[in-house]
Amino acid sequence: MTYLNQPEYVRYVCNCGSLKPISKIYFCRHCLMIRCGYCVCQEVDSHYCPNCMENLPSSEVRLKKNKCSNCFDCPCCFQTLSTRAGLASPKVPGTATATEGEENKDVKSTPKKIYYLFCSLCRWSSRDAGIPDQTAATGGWPELENPHTIRINTLIDYHKVLASIEKQQCERKKYQPKRSYMPAQSVYSFTSALVRKRIGRPIKPPVQSHSAAHPVPSTASEEVEELPSDIFTEPVDITKGKAPATRFTTLEQRLQYPEAQVEKINDLRPQHRQFLVKRSQRCRVCEHNVSKSDLCPQSTKFKILLAAFYHIPEVKIVTCEPLRPGKSSELLLKFCNPTQHQTQITILPLDTPLSISFLEEKENVIQEDTQEVIIKLRCESSLASTVRQAPVIEDPKSIKVTPNADILLPHSSFILPQRDDAAEYDDTSDNHNFQDDPKLVVWRKGNKAVIRLHVTPRETIENQENPIVIGFVMQHGYVNTIPALEHKLPQKADVKLQLYLTLGQLVGET
């Protein structure tokens, strides 16, 4: 799988116009389209701690401010801290009083177990910061208090009041009271609401203003502490100081704790480890999941994984002859079929419309005793065929890549068999008996085949330093095994995809 992280020599064109390798795109089996990261929406499925693997719902994560209560990060190197145990120093024997006598000499003082935080990478410990040891391994470590806690809580309470007022106003606009029917005997009886309406005042008294909850506005101050005099004379070394207490923190260490932003290393305090999330990707067009992982944080499996390299034939560049302007060069491409169904691949020009055509399946109708059953089956098959043959066309956006070489397209297509994992370790010859064109198919094994194409770089290339890029449309047969309401059998379709290949630089004119 290391080739998936190599430079992007073979790129597939998404419907949004972006070019991505096959390792970074999805294939929606409902739309029969490839989707990149811009064409899917992200959804958070679960939150978990990467250290203790604790899985919590979203409501509890909000209360804990997206931080684990049991795990801590090192304030220096940001690695996970471990809890280590030690023994408290016993009392000195000479401190015993003289009235206790000789009986206390034989009594041994039992040492207590104490716990402290330690980083196995940078050797930082909570004792270096002056944090007292704890008697329980679960924690209770003192945290660095935010000096602006009162101000922040005041602003939060004020915005909660504003949100409740806005919600009441929205509900009041939605509610439109109907005109009440006034009976004849109560024509001359006036209520307080009717009196307020007659004299021009609102029916309900105005809501009392929450002036008391309004926070005090912040004011700018020109009083700034002066810098010490030795800062202009003595050299500053942020890595090595005279003592550990005088070492300065780096910019990354300060931004890790924005509420305090301490200057000395000894003032740093361990922070709770933040939760990670498991996400699921959903297609923006049909709103079906293309990727959904298991909710268990210890599991690396996926419930749904529609990665493109599991459903679309993969194209690799095997070899390419030296490229010269105006001269033909041989190009070998390797195609691999990852599906469990046989597929047929056809290379088409780049200007071919990307329409998905559904193939009509040949249904064998069993002869029944009565002719009415046969007519009914024919009607159902004709109705299903009209649904399958309806083309689905989406106009792609403009692409900024321009090919600068011509490619000689083959006149025939070739077939790739289904994927067989056992064939990877089988050294015997494959007995597929495909009638391949020897000028097109060079090598074949299992579900892989290598074809030969001819590429001619154009002589009118303005910048000789630009790489040679070619493009074509790959049409392959896809079998959709998802059952639908109108399609209970596997549905076959011809899917067309645009590909751009970067072949390399020109070697010269001769």
Image (tube, rainbow, N blue to C red):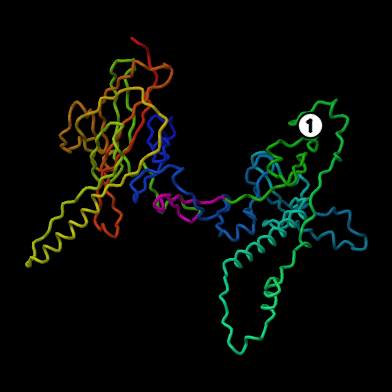
Q: Does residue 149 lie above or below 401 as drawn?
A: below
Instruction: Name the outermost residue toward the top.
Output: 510
Instruction: Please tell me in which quadrant of the rendered image residue 420 appears.
Output: top left
How many numbered marks are there? 1
Quadrant location of the C terminus in the rendered image: top left
Rendering coords of residue 173 (x, y %) = 59, 66
Q: Is residue 288 magenta?
A: yes
Please check the rendered image and state whether residue 297 is part of the magenta-colored stretch, yes or no: no
Is 54 in front, or is 198?
Answer: 198
Q: Give the residue displayed 45% in from the left and 52% down from the top.
A: 293
Q: Main secondary structure of the magenta part?
A: strand
Circle 1: is it few (<14), some (14-19), or many (20+) Cα within 10 Å? few
Relative placement, left or right, of 152 versus 510 is right
Query: At which x and y percent is residue 336?
Result: 30, 37
Disc 1: which residue:
241
Residue lying furthest right in this view? 98
Where residue 8 appears, as percent x and y from the top left, is 42, 31
Relative placement, left or right, of 110 versus 501 is right
Q: Residue at x 72, y 54 (%)?
A: 141
Q: Quadrant of residue 113?
A: bottom right
Q: In this picture, is 279 found above or below 319?
A: below
Residue 16 rendering spot, x and y as whole percentages: 42, 40
* Left or right: residue 435 compared with residue 2: left
Which of the pair 165/336 is nearer the observer? 165
Q: Which residues are magenta?
A: 276-296
Q: Secondary structure at mark 1?
A: loop
Q: Residue at x 75, y 52 (%)?
A: 133
In the displayed structure image, the side of residue 399 where residue 362 appears, left or right: left
Identity of the amino acid at label 1? Gly
Quarter placement of the N terminus: top left
